[in-house]
Image (cartoon, rainbow, N blue to C red):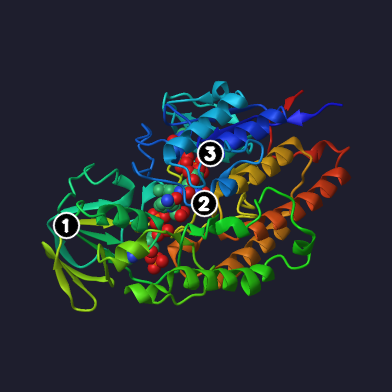
Amino acid sequence: MTRTLPKVAIIGAGSSGMIACRELKVRGIPFDCFEKGSQAGGNWIFKNDNGMSAAYRSLHINTSRQQMEFLCFPMPRHYPTYPHHSQIAEYFDAFLDHFRLKEDITFNTEVKKAEPQKDGSWQLTLANGTQPVYDAVIVANGHHWDPRWPEPAFPGEFHGITMHSHAYLDPTEPHELIDRNVLVVGMGNSAMDIACELGNRGVARNVYLSARSGTHIMPKFFGSRPADAFLRHPGREPFWWEHIVPYQYFEKVAFPLISWKIRRAVGRPEDYGLPKPRHAFGMAHPTISSEVHIRLGSGDIKPKPNIKELQGDRVQFVDGSVVPIDAIIYATGYKISFPFFDKTVLPYENNDLPLFKRMMSPRYDNLLFLGLVQPLCSIMPIAELQASFMGDYLLGTYRLPDKDTMDKVMRAEHEMMKRRYTDSQRHTIQINCLEYSYDLRKEFKEGRKRAERWADKPERVPTTFPSAVRV
Ligand SMILES: Cc1cc2nc3c(=O)[nH]c(=O)nc-3n(C[C@H](O)[C@H](O)[C@H](O)COP(=O)(O)OP(=O)(O)OC[C@H]3O[C@@H](n4cnc5c(N)ncnc54)[C@H](O)[C@@H]3O)c2cc1C
Ligand SMILES: NC(=O)c1ccc[n+]([C@@H]2O[C@H](COP(=O)([O-])OP(=O)(O)OC[C@H]3O[C@@H](n4cnc5c(N)ncnc54)[C@H](OP(=O)(O)O)[C@@H]3O)[C@@H](O)[C@H]2O)c1
């Protein structure tokens, strides 16, 4: 039988880009993967020469390895539950070697522009000036590299060191923070890790942690088990009962149970001087730390509310307190950015980019987004599932619903997400892993049936794959 296959470009070879390479390669779909840096692994390459990694020297993962590993290539069993970033980088390197993918990646090659052509294809402009054309593009450029600073900026002026957590490497790089008074802003995982490291005795003189909103802080372990052990790896088939109660199980049973376990293990945030969360556990991206309670409880980190005003070498907080500060680290999160798209290609604001199944805009049937999710679990198994979905789609064994249906589903899901999670730029692409993976599988099945109905028709593959090659 004659099959038509599109030629695909993959932008980025972080963990998302590399699983896309694997899924396309096993299906025999021709592709080129362009990576800005000289190595694959993205965020997990410490001091990555792409200039985009947020990894600090002491970084360990905070989703257990059993949750983070690709199903097609499990992490070594001798790894600890929460490996160091260097082990994660080694794992991804081994993944590339195992599937012989390095030869498919063009390193040191940034994609500067991606422009839709009149015939529906995409023309890329690469850093070396060449302009290859593709039938489809998979965007896997990551969403934790473009620092988000407080907007609007806090009133007043600050004369000390100002940096974003993205630039933080250790207590001496890029700035000497030993024996300084440091203020860390934010209550996410970056803020926790950095405040705890600097709060160690003998590192910074004083560490203040400023929270504008409360958050539940989950320890890494309950007893000897990783805290996320209650989750099934999203790549595995769901249990039978999840077919009946997919999300309700979390809202009604799992989340309240975890919340209770957290209270039993470490108490409430208010017990440590932090603001009381205004949301139930599970309604915001999880903050995970086993250390912050000890540091707060030992006085090594001093809790503070939001900043009111910067006053030269001092900072005033909304409770009226004023403390001398030498350095402010804004651990205030990241912006979703696609510098290679013109603003008109994909208009979106404030990190808010609704997509069908968090992968496609109904506007383009040959532009796919991979790993563009903020899961309650780990990104990798979700990217693995998405990449296999994309592989089937590009192969023609999955067919999309019509554009109106896509649009309707996309809007309904987006509204549901907004209702469910706290209103913040952190929660514009939030998913519940098991619900999402369950839902994606269901869509897979329906799309396969649609594809079968179209099997004998030449329009089987999307119409905007113009130069699809014959194999
Ligand atoms: C400090 C920190 C810790 C984290 N810890 C965890 C964790 O424990 N568990 C978890 O699941 N997630 C964690 N994350 C989330 C993180 O985003 C994922 O772990 C993972 O890095 C996502 O992979 P990715 O491939 O989508 O993006 P990235 O790792 O960011 O990779 C994107 C790749 O695309 C390349 N690229 C970008 N633009 C271009 C371009 N224009 N042309 C060519 N190449 C380009 C980059 O060079 C990079 O290699 C963490 C994030 C941060 C910031
Ligand atoms: N060890 C690890 O594995 C590890 C370490 C670091 C990061 N990560 C991951 O990396 C991603 C990014 O984490 P992150 O902690 O850098 O960012 P984040 O999760 O987006 O958290 C940003 C924090 O800054 C606060 N904030 C934002 N703007 C503010 C402002 N103007 N004033 C005061 N506070 C403000 C937010 O409060 P609101 O909630 O009020 O918006 C939130 O507490 C997450 O997926 C995280 O899990 C993992």
Q: Residue at x 76, y 30 (%)?
A: 4
Labelled pair 2, 3 in contact (Cβ < 8 Å): no
Q: Which numbered disc, 3 or 1, marks the residue closer to the eye?
A: 1
Label 3 within 8 A of ligand 1 by Cβ: yes
In the figure, 207 relative to 372: above or below?
Answer: below
Mark sitting on residue 205: 1
Residue 40, image x and y in percent? 48, 31
Residue 16, image x and y in percent? 55, 40
* Amino acid, disc 3: Ser
Q: Which residue is mark 2?
A: 63
Comes first in the chain, label 2 or label 3: 3
Q: Which numbered disc, 2 or 3, marks the residue closer to the eye?
A: 2
Residue in front for this viewpoint, 84 or 112? 84
Q: Quarter of the image containing the C terminus?
A: top right
Label 1 within 8 A of ligand 2 by Cβ: no
Any part of residue 286 in sight: yes
| Element on which disc 2 rests | loop
Distance (Cα) linking label 2 and label 1: 31 Å
Mark sitting on residue 15: 3
Residue 326, image x and y in percent? 14, 57
Q: Residue at x 29, y 46 (%)?
A: 168
* Amino acid, disc 1: Arg
Q: Residue at x 65, y 46 (%)?
A: 386
> Is residue 93 found left or right of 447 in the rendered image?
left
Q: For label 1, count other residues whose C-alpha is less than 10 Å away and answer few (under 14), some (14-19) or many (20+).
A: some
Distance (Cα) linking label 3 and label 1: 38 Å
For residue 357, what is the image quadrant?
bottom right
